[in-house]
Image: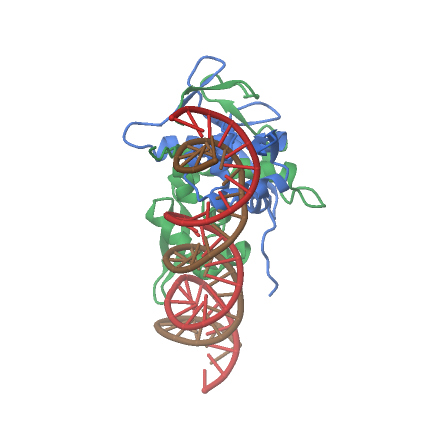
Chain colours: A blue, B green, C brown, D red
Amino acid sequence: MTTEVRECSVARTLELVGSKWTLLVVRELFLGSRRFEEIARFTGGPRDILTDRLRRLEAHGLVTRVQYERRPPRFEYHLTDLGRSLAPIIATMREFGDRHLAGDDGPPATFVHSCGAEYHPVLACRACGEVVRRGDVEIADAAI
Amino acid sequence: MTTEVRECSVARTLELVGSKWTLLVVRELFLGSRRFEEIARFTGGPRDILTDRLRRLEAHGLVTRVQYERRPPRFEYHLTDLGRSLAPIIATMREFGDRHLAGDDGPPATFVHSCGAEYHPVLACRACGEVVRRGDVEIADAAI
DNA sequence: TCGGGTTGGTTTGGTTTTCCAACTCGATTA
DNA sequence: TAATCGAGTTGGAAAACCAAACCAACCCGA
């Protein structure tokens, strides 16, 4: 009986962003925080862990550390293009939370799409552009 | 100076599914695994942790545990509707992994949309149905 | 020039989780 | 009777996590 662990893309993605605080750091960067103090304050995470997560994200090319001041050396963190491509993951998580885990006073933030409506993301097929509903997608090739 | 931690939907979602192995369990259920042994085999996770995750998912209504045999009592795990609504999170993670973290022989699984094309999810605006590109969405109300 | 304050961490010391292998338990098949 | 199976438990070690304190390098006001 061999180990039949599925080496899937979900697992690989989770190795990158699946540990505690990582995605909250990324969320903060999406929201415009740049400095360590902001990230620490708004996520509430332990500073040593945040340091570790930022280094790890940097090592994988999702974040860059930019010196904005020498003489005391000070740094800002920016998402790279690769980092920004995590947007759909954050957006679908936000949507799930808004819908199913909202607090007493509804979702804590709202976004607007360029069409003018309040923005709620749904999945669409890249090829045909149609919004996907349950049952529209089938697995073509097992092993995920 | 008060603690200004953002109580956002992303954070709430991560409390639910943000610890290690949870999303891999959910992925397995999406792929059709039902029994503990399958989940253990295909995720490779420690059995005690998997038990914990399944109980936790059950407690939050994402999974139901169904007895399919008495006399040795045996159980199956099924996603509830709420659990199935995690699909976009899994799908966007898979897409990210396929695109940026694929192994040597490309993505390990492919899916097909009902339009006939290979399925790759992109985000669209629920209201207007248009595919979202960078810059199309703005925050309307801070605090996320 | 002295005492604070700011920024971006690192260190310390302990708590919690996670990990893993081995074991259990009831029932079933050989 | 032994071996097997499914679905966990158990115990101990390793890793991750956490809060608080500390540090370095500067800036500011008195």
- For this rendering, which residue is in front, A13 or A142? A13
Residue B102's quadrant in the figure? top right
Is C18 drawn above or below residue B111 in the view shown? below
Q: Residue furthest left?
A: A104
Foreground of the two, A77 or D11: A77
Q: Nearer the viewer, residue A44 or C12?
A: C12
Can see residue A18? Answer: yes
Q: Residue at x 48, y 27 (%)?
A: A31
Residue A99, x across and y down, in percent: 37, 31
Nearer to the camera, B72 or A105: A105
Name the side, left or right, on which B140 lies relative to A67.
left
Q: Specify the quadrant of the image occupied by residue C2.
A: top left
Q: Where residue B128 sits in the image (x, y, percent)?
A: 48, 16
Residue B142 percent coordinates (x, y): 40, 23
Residue visible at 50% across and 35% down in the picture = A36
Residue B113 appears in view: no
**Residue that extends furthest to the right in the rendered view of this protein:** B104
Which residue corresponds to the image point at 59% horizontal and 52% vertical from the top-left? A6
Work out which quarter of the rendered image holds the N terminus of chain A and state it.
Answer: bottom right
Name the residue rendered at 58%, 43% in the picture: A56
